[in-house]
């Protein structure tokens, strides 16, 4: 049933990447008590919910997206008691908690995969994964998203499928045992009080039965070609009944628990099928994240996604950054239209940091002016850039090795946060330790350098979130205006100047917030977004 008052329809949800948010014990790795201890800052920021990337027991070959036990907490991050405390503390501050669920694959250290290895070919244990016998050659031509073949051969001659790292074997969702297990995992966390799940690779669980050959390479978040033939491993019709069954479980719990799809699916009408009234609640709008900084393309993607979601009664879920992509403060510092790159190294072309930050602030203010829900990625509220000069020896993303060093990977957006300019590890933890090196420029971005400082990125986000709430922008609608890239949302005009000349505000409009100061004549300069009351 469509609940038009539901909290998530206009929620601003902040992604916490537990390894890199705050470290309570000084081992250089963020942890759950670290997050709990810093929640008051997120309350002050004005967000509605946090989404926590995986904190489950894991060998960490893919930063926790290789889960060895879905019902625990990795000792690096704490224990179950710490998860309970975090949830309770967040709730007491009015913040909801979404956890990450990784159903496409387990870790190769998961008890099920270990049992499958031990039991051997033809066993029911192997039926939980996708094993095939095909002799010397892999069963088909599929490639891993991280590079190389998607198949790994065991000494007994069988191959298993891994669409990601070799340590992430894909589960067999045709097996009822797999389905039952995940329903139980959902209940485990719902009973502990979580408000929802971000579903990893939601478009990947079901594979075409005959595993047809497919040579197109898939990239992280890479949209599928809407004009091309449908890939045999993504966006299969069969995924939907899985989410319908999950939805029935969530609906048994009070308070509006949600499912958000991480699904690299195009076009927008296809993605909208994941958020039909009896399925998930939200699906990340990655075409928006990937749209170039140009008014025509942005307007098209905004219109198309609002229309596609309206058709199924869903709101749109905007996002500009996450732990898989170059931070938007750096992405937007490249010439307009530069395709999103899989990481940046010291020898690669470098972004224009000042331009990138200016456009990122304008892009965020534009996004937060749109109706629907929006996700923020930790650190963007500080204007953090990507670490674009990280020495390669620190890289941990499996994409770096599996691509034969062709892709720098995602470490540059995962660097631990700076909280205090003058503290060890910039306040990330009580020691100097930090699992990825923090760049020397982190001091100028530290929270304590920005709090109470007019015009800082932190204060811009805080002001925008408070005005967004006050004016009900998340519940509004988009009415495009003539002559400029501008729309009316309720009583607020949202205007972004993409042109080279300053733009006048309509007479009588009262400025609410702007991503940079207006010029001396009160006009909106290039690469600036304003909200004005009409
Ligand atoms: C998407 C996650 O966001 C990413 O970090 C991960 O590597 C893959 N799914 C595989 O789980």
Image (cartoon, helix red, strand yellow):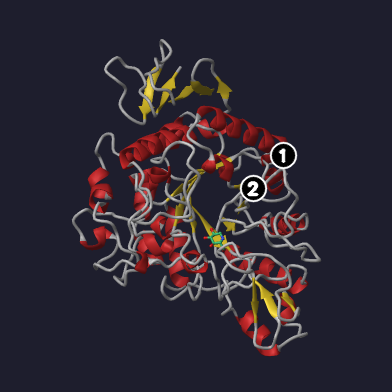
Q: Nearer the viewer, residue 443 or 337?
A: 337
User: Does mark 2 have its CB less than 8 Å from ligand 1?
Assistant: no
Residue linked to disc 1 = 312
Q: Are marks 2 and 1 in contact (CB under 8 Å)?
A: no
Residue 285 shows in this picture: no
Density class for disc 1 (Cα within 10 Å; few <14, some 14-19, many ≥20) is some
Q: Nearer the viewer, residue 170 or 499?
A: 499
Looking at the image, in which quadrant does ligand 1 appear? bottom right
Look at 64% across and 38% down and name the residue there.
4
The quadrant in which residue 527 appears is top left
Look at 63% across and 52% down and name the residue there.
263
Residue linked to disc 2 = 281
Give the Cα separation between the discs numbered 2 and 1. 11 Å
Q: Whole-percent x and y of residue 473?
A: 51, 31
Report the side of 300 relative to 348 (left or right): right
Q: Nearer the viewer, residue 208 or 41?
A: 208
Q: Kindly give the residue lying farthest to the right in the view shown.
A: 210
């Amino acid at each position: 049933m469509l609940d038009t008052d539901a909290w998530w329809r206009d929620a601003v949800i902040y992604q916490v990447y537990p390894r890199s948010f705050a470290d309570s014990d000084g081992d250089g790795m963020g942890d759950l008590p670290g997050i709990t201890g810093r929640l008051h800052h997120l309350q002050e920021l004005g967000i509605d919910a946090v989404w926590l990337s995986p904190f489950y027991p894991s060998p960490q070959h893919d930063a926790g997206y290789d889960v060895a036990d879905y019902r625990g907490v990795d000792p690096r991050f704490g224990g179950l008691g710490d998860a309970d405390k975090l949830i309770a503390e967040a709730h007491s501050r009015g913040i909801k908690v979404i956890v990450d669920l990784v159903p496409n694959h387990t870790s190769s250290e998961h008890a099920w995969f270990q049992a499958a290895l031990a039991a051997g070919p033809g066993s029911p244990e192997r039926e939980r994964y996708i094993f095939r016998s095909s002799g010397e050659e892999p069963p088909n031509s599929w490639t891993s998203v991280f590079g190389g073949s998607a198949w790994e051969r065991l000494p007994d001659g069988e191959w298993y499928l891994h669409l990601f790292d070799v340590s992430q074997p894909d589960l067999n969702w045709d097996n009822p045992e797999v389905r039952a297990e995940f329903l139980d995992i959902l209940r485990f966390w719902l009973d502990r009080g979580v408000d929802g799940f971000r579903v990893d690779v939601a478009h990947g669980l079901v594979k075409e039965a005959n595993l047809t050959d497919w040579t197109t390479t898939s990239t992280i978040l890479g949209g599928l070609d809407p004009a091309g033939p449908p890939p045999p491993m993504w966006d299969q019709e069969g995924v939907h009944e899985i989410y319908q069954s999950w939805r029935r479980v969530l609906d048994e719990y009070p308070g509006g628990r949600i499912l958000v799809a991480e699904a690299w699916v195009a076009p927008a009408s296809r993605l909208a099928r994941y958020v039909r009234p009896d399925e998930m609640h939200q699906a990340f709008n990655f075409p928006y994240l990937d749209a170039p900084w140009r008014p025509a393309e942005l307007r098209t993607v905004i219109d198309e996604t609002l229309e596609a979601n309206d058709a199924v009664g869903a709101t749109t879920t905007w996002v500009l950054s996450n732990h898989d992509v170059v931070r938007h403060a750096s992405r937007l510092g490249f010439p307009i239209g530069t395709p999103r790159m899989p990481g940046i190294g010291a020898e690669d072309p470098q972004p224009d940091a000042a331009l990138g930050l200016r456009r990122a602030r304008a892009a965020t203010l534009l996004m937060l002016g749109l109706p629907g829900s929006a996700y923020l990625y930790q650190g963007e509220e500080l204007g953090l850039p990507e670490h674009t000069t990280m020495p390669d020896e620190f890289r941990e993303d499996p994409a770096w090795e599996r691509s034969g060093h062709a892709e720098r990977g995602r470490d540059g957006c995962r660097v631990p946060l700076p909280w205090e300019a003058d503290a060890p590890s910039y306040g990330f933890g009580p020691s100097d330790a930090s699992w990825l090196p923090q760049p020397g420029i982190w001091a100028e971005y530290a929270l304590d350098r920005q709090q109470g400082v007019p015009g800082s990125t932190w204060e811009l986000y805080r002001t925008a979130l408070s005005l967004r709430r006050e004016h009900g922008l998340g519940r509004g609608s988009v009415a495009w205006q003539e002559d400029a890239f501008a729309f009316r949302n309720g009583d607020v005009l949202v205007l972004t100047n993409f042109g080279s000349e300053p733009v006048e505000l309509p007479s009588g409009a009262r400025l609410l917030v702007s991503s940079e100061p207006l010029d001396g004549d009160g006009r909106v300069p290039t690469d600036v977004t304003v909200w004005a009351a009409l």
